[in-house]
Image: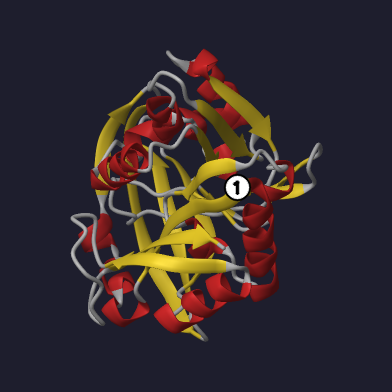
């Protein structure tokens, strides 16, 4: 799951092809939440559309290499990845998410008792002196406003111990991955607890470092269709590097894909591993 101090995005099919957004309000945090995080049927579909993948392997291995004992998963959603992190003995794992329906689902899953679940945004991280904070599912791209992105980085800085690690990814705008966000390339049909689903995305417009698109969701058993409008921010490598440095981080690694290949100008991903100064 991804969020930006108010807007949340779901990524489907394990490849980030199906982001959706629709505003609803969560009274405890007054955060605008995606319909997919408050509508029970759509919450049930999250892990089907977001299976374990190469990104999970990357972050699990990183946590092991760092011998991280205290780990924060910001934007944990249904907690599929969070629970896997907590399977290692001696770890303290915190899953933070503002969507109560997503956390309710997470708490019902096997191994959920090993995680401390917190409803809220980065403001709820506190100062646990964590070894590692991870943001998966292209969280950084949902922060359309630079001030909110910078504010979140400051919250993360406070939550990490000196020398602690922040890891996240963002799509490389030079790669122009949104050109494959169309019905032909993103169409996904699958069986779900609510019958056969058909989903796809279509780009509405591109400009000013933002991509505007719509996600289509059809419950074929009833013919019900949900069309959800969304925007994502595609920051450049220079912009993300500058924001991290201004927040007090030193970039230790920048990868271009989940196999840890070096970042190149045409790489599909920008995977940052940064250390708190």
Left or right: residue 6 compared with residue 39 = right
Estimate how packed mark 1 is, as few (under 14), some (14 to 19) or many (20 or more) residues with alpha carbons within 10 Å: some
Judged from this view, the residue extending furthest toward the bottom is 208
In the rendered image, residue 79, in percent from the top left (x then y), is placed at: 47, 30
In the rendered image, residue 159, in percent from the top left (x then y), is placed at: 65, 47
Between 17 and 262, the residue placed more toward the observer is 262
What residue do we see at 49% from left, 35% from top? 42
Between 34 and 271, the residue placed more toward the observer is 271
Read off the residue under disc 1: 161
Q: Is residue 123 above or below residue 151?
A: above
In the rendered image, residue 149, in percent from the top left (x then y), is placed at: 62, 66
Between 2 and 224, the residue placed more toward the observer is 2
In the rendered image, residue 167, in percent from the top left (x then y), is placed at: 44, 54
Left or right: residue 138 compared with residue 94 = left
Q: Is residue 176 above or below residue 8?
A: below
Query: Quarter holding the C terminus?
Result: bottom right
Evaluate whether residue 229 shows in this view: yes
Between 64 and 170, the residue placed more toward the observer is 64
Q: How is the image coloured?
A: secondary structure
Q: Quadrant of residue 60?
A: top left
Which element carries disc 1, helix, strand or loop?
A: strand
Q: Quadrant of residue 39?
A: top right
What residue do we see at 68% from left, 61% from top? 154
């Amino acid at each position: 799951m991804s969020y930006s101090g108010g807007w949340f995005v779901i990524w489907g099919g394990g490849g980030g092809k199906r982001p959706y957004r629709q505003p609803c309000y969560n009274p405890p945090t007054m955060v605008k939440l995606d319909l997919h995080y408050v509508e029970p049927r759509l919450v049930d579909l999250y892990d089907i559309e977001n299976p374990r993948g190469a990104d999970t392997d990357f972050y699990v291995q990183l946590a092991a290499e760092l011998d991280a004992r205290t780990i924060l998963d910001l934007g944990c959603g249904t907690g599929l990845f969070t629970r896997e992190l907590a399977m290692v003995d001696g770890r303290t794992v915190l899953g933070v998410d503002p969507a109560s329906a997503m956390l309710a689902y997470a708490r019902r899953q096997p191994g959920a008792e090993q995680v401390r679940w917190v409803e809220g945004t980065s403001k709820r991280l506190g100062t646990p002196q964590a070894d590692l904070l991870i943001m998966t599912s292209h969280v950084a791209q949902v922060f359309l406003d630079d001030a909110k992105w910078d504010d979140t980085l400051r919250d993360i800085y406070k939550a990490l111990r000196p020398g602690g690690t922040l890891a996240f990814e963002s799509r490389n705008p030079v790669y122009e991955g949104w050109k494959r966000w169309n019905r032909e390339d993103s169409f996904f049909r699958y069986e779900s607890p609510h019958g056969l689903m058909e989903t796809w995305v279509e780009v509405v417009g591109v400009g000013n470092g933002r991509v505007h698109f719509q996600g289509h969701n059809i419950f074929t058993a009833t013919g019900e269709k949900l069309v959800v409008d969304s925007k994502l921010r595609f920051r450049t490598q220079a912009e993300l590097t500058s924001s991290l440095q201004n927040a007090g981080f030193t970039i230790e690694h920048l990868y271009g894909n989940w196999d840890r290949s070096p970042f190149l100008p045409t790489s599909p991903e920008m995977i940052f591993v940064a250390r708190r100064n």
